[in-house]
Amino acid sequence: MSTESAPAPKSGVAEDVQQGPRVAVSALITNLREYGLILALIAIMVFFQFTTSGTLFKPVNLSNLVQQNSFIIVMALGMLLVIVSGHIDLSVGSVAGFIGALAAMMMVIWPLGPFSNPLVVSIICLIIGGGIGAAQGYWIAYHRIPSFIVTLAGMLIFRGICQALLGGGSSVGPLPDGFKALSSGFIPDVIGPLMLIPPTVNAAGKTIIGSGLTLHMTTIVIGLVAVLAYAYFGLRARRTREQHGYEAEPFTLFVIKTLVTSALALFLVYQFATYKGLPIVLMVMGVLIALFVFVTKRMTIGRRIYAMGGNAKAAQLSGIKTERLTLMVFVNMGVLSALGGLIIAARLGQAVPAAGLGSELDVIAAVFIGGASAMGGVGQVIGAVVGGFIMGVMNNGMSIMGVNVDWQQVVKGLVLLGAVVFDVYNKNKG
Amino acid sequence: MASTILEMRDITKTFPGVKALSNVNLSVEEGEIHAVVGENGAGKSTLMKVLSGVYASGTYDGAIIYRGEECHFKGIHDSEHKGIVIIHQELALVPMLSIAENIFLGNEHARFGIIDWNANETRTSALLKKVGLKEDPKTLITNIGVGKQQLVEIAKALSKEVKLLILDEPTASLSEKDSQALLDLLLEFKRQGITSILISHKLNEVNRVADKVTIIRDGRTIETLAKKDISEDRIITSMVGRSLDDRYPPREPKIGEIVLQVKNWSVYHPIHAERQVIKGIDINVRKGEVVGIAGLMGAGRTEFAMSLFGRSYGRRITGEVLLKGKPIDVSSVSKAVEHGIAYVTEDRKTYGLNLIDHIKHNITLANLPGVSRHAVIDDLRELAVANDYKAKTNIRSSSVYQMTGNLSGGNQQKVVLSKWLFANPEVLILDEPTRGIDVGAKYEIYTIIARLASEGKAIIVISSEMPELLGITDRIYVMNEGRMVGEMAASDASQEKIMRAIVRGEGKAS
């Protein structure tokens, strides 16, 4: 649809289209890192689609994949800012575990009356997460204690509190259904389902599960609206740039990019629609991703974080309050760790002492696979998200294939190393 | 005796998209001091990197003939092995190690990996004596000044039995006194038979010590002048490809009321709490006036400026700052910026720029609200601002999306200047605004300063180059050891007068 609504090319643009392919190729090469990552994700997905004989893209599995990995991606959003600002946070897995335990205690064990309502508990937990981030960020920002050390301490402290809360090795649950919906729920079909092929009925008069084809129409509509909005805003941004006399990226490349992204998105949306619709956690994640893309690309605070990570002294001498900014980055990380903790607990249906154990490493790996620099100042939200999905798809695909967990770790380690080596090699070449 | 020690023939080096050097020829005779001059970005440093093997043989075209044989250096180790040592503009010393440890780093007197400290220190003392540095070999690098660090670098080169010494802008960050000492040292080396290649922007230095000068412009050799033909005017003409009649732009000062006044400003050292760095300074600047602060390295000029700018240096800062007669609070950088004070640092790489980001983002960093609404950045407005300042300050780059880390020193300086101009200050403090940049870019910076003054800004210029202060300012303060020891109108100031004030001040201080 983006080609149809494209404006009639002006003289300058026509020229652009004429030499489009060449320009597009050169633009593609200059942005190899960005596109390369998405291409890598697609390649990995196709690979597992074959090796799992088509299980990977099955609607049920896609829902599983999202539910299993959403907490990694949510926390990777915060970790991206932490790493861009030149720091690291090793405590996120423990904070997530602690918050999960706290939420379970508040909802199941402690007699809190109305305050044990899942929504109230979630809000309190997010605030406490922010408080934890502030407590760690305070030492890092105002006392210049290296973040590695402060958050290593935090990692020990909050895992300990998590286990103590749950009374040793026991788990606490079951959690209320309203809370579990955060992870395992799907958006309601307010429009109503559309039955394309009626399900087969067996001899006993019962429908055979999985037969027939019914579409979750709300999902389809949300997907279409999102894709249309994406194309519309892309076009509008191009047009304002051109109206102001600035070059936009080559039109051919823009069209290809928009079409490929839209097709991929619509394919996934369709798959979800044939099952139970969009998972609630996917919606939460989508909104957060959009928010963080906006904050990093368009807002002054995002720009300041990048400047601080690139050269903290220069940023400070440009009037940026680097201490406060660092504190805010860690508060944000704390809130997202707490959200990650709630998502884990909701998926498991209970709080366990080992919840989120080791997940800080997956989160950090996702951000680095996504192209962030360990020196700070460099990294993209979309990169971190794609990095998170690459890790998730590999986990999921290898599990279906029956690859031993030990070897899964080896493969993940090699992918992390490979991605960063590729990045450094690319940078030196450019 | 005049045999050719080094000949570089038809050197061509291409980077993706740019031809940095094309058919450059350089011929150096044994025992001479050969100066290589050229504007920033002309290709001098690239040429030296080719010579020293930083760019390995095979990545460039052309031949290097050193002492009669063609060399193919694969790395800096190969060239050092042959006695070619390069001292870079950015010193490569480890700050937390001692002088002796630095000099023999990677080359320690050791037996089976166990270091013989006595041998190292004895040799270090001998080397330090040669370069005229009176310091204990055990002193940490971080505790000695830049001038002395430079001497340590040279001592390190001597330890490698250097035959051809290459110095890239050795005096860029040195005071007049240290620079003189360094040049004398070069002449001394010449007597001992060491050949030197000197890369410098300071033409008076070239004039003083060089036997020959090769001028490079836009990646090509323009000409090589013998001693008798060397003159500043000739060099400048060849460097910029045009003649510069006047090295300072003409200006008609229109001076108004006092804008900034600082009273009894005192600052203590951030680490050595009892050491007073700034001792009760009073200065003022008027509207449309360019005021200079002269002084030697270590006089406390940068410390004064940074402490004034949001307490970015020092502790226990006392004193009063008045803007147009009203006391203002400059206790943080953002407050200082809000009151219209801007400080353009002397060290643009460390304090001025985000080198891994492009020009556009650097220019708007100090005034993001100026390109945003409700904390959301208007990308097009930002682009317009960046392009505007790129044109105004004549930043040479392919676009505003070029990384500042890849720009030449002069262009980097223009980016930092643009950043502060966009913050629209009333008082602009420029700390060594032309350090390490070439003659052409210097002139452009002077033009910008003159234009700002005519627009009614109050400007303070800190500079170690006295001719520059005499050329562009209206009034000059002389600073020494944390005190103001003199104040004179530029019209009746001279280098001698300034030096005399410093010397007299020194007498007073002790």
Image: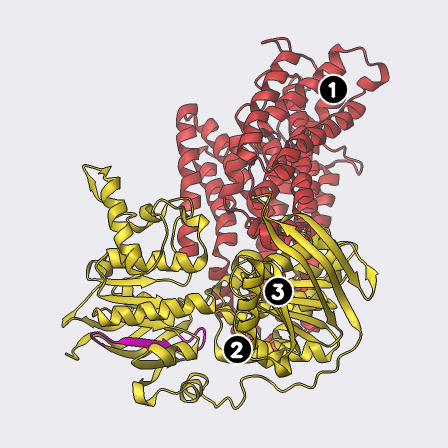
Chain colours: A red, B yellow
Q: Which chain does tag 3 point to?
A: B
Are labels 3 and 2 on one chain? yes
User: Is disc 2 on the same chain as disc 1?
Assistant: no
In the picture, measured across the screen, residue A313 lies left or right of residue A114, that is left
Is B30 a magenta residue?
A: yes
Q: What's the mark number on residue A177?
A: 1
Q: Nearer the viewer, mark 1 or mark 3?
A: 3
Distance from Cα at disc 1 to Cα at disc 3: 51 Å
Quadrant for residue B348, please give it.
bottom right
Q: Provide the residue designation for mark 3.
A: B360
Q: Going from the N terminus, do you reach mark 3 or mark 2 first?
A: 3
Q: Residues within 10 Å of mark 2 (few under 14, many from 20)?
A: few
Q: Which residue is mark 2?
A: B496
How many C-alpha atoms fall within 10 Å of the one at disc 3: few (<14), some, or many (≥20)? many
Residue A58 in the magenta stretch? The answer is: no
Q: Which residues are magenta?
A: B29-42
